[in-house]
Amino acid sequence: MAEIRLLARLGARGERRIEAAAGEPLLEAINRAGLPLGQSCRGEGICRSCAVQVIAGAAALSPPPPIERRARGLDLVGGWRLACQAQVADPAATLVVWHPSWGEPAPPPEGSPGAGPNTPAEPRDTR
């Protein structure tokens, strides 16, 4: 099972860690963790409200499908993925994921996955 660290500053729990099986969409894992994440299109990849930033471990996810590659304003290069479309591909991986509605995360400790210059940033709107 892949470990997913969700960088959340909601309530006393803070960062949450969950496990996800190969083939499981990030959206399902995030819902299991009880974190808020929009999904008005019911997982079809057209509303973009489930866009999350993958700070570490992006290579452990499935490649972006065509609908994700065509999504306006989704910065794939900056690590943004649609949680409804991105699936865990490597069950031995550790991923670090963030969403703006979860609050600003504390900086990761030095030497941990996600440490370094790639800090969370809002998705760019390219309209």
Image (spheres, rainbow, N blue to C red):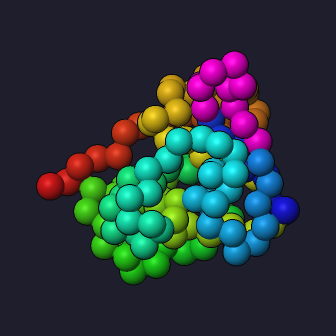
Q: Is residue 71 above or below residue 125?
A: below
Residue 35 pos. (x, y %): 60, 41
Is residue 59 among the parts visible in the rendering? no
Q: Quadrant of residue 28?
A: bottom right
Between 77 and 63, the residue placed more toward the observer is 63
Q: Quadrant of residue 15?
A: top right
Single out the residue that lies furthest toward the left. 127
Residue 12 pos. (x, y %): 69, 19
Single out the residue that lies furthest toward the top. 12
Locate residue 49 relative to residue 97 in the image: left or right: left
Kindly identify the residue that appears in the image at 72 percent across and 37 percent down: 16
Is residue 54 among the parts visible in the rendering? yes
Residue 106 pos. (x, y %): 61, 23
* Quarter containing the N terminus: bottom right
* Quarter containing the C terminus: bottom left
Q: How many marks?
A: 0
Locate residue 95 relative to residue 65 in the image: left or right: right
Magenta segment's dominant SS is: loop
Residue 106 included in the magenta stretch of the image: no
Single out the residue that lies furthest toward the bottom. 66
The magenta region covers 8-17
Residue 11 included in the magenta stretch of the image: yes
Q: Is residue 3 above or below residue 68?
A: above
Kindly identify the residue that appears in the image at 69 percent across and 51 percent down: 32
Kindly identify the residue that appears in the image at 54 percent across and 74 percent down: 63
Kindly identify the residue that appears in the image at 51 percent across and 65 percent down: 84
Q: Is residue 87 above or below residue 96?
A: below
Q: Quadrant of residue 24?
A: bottom right
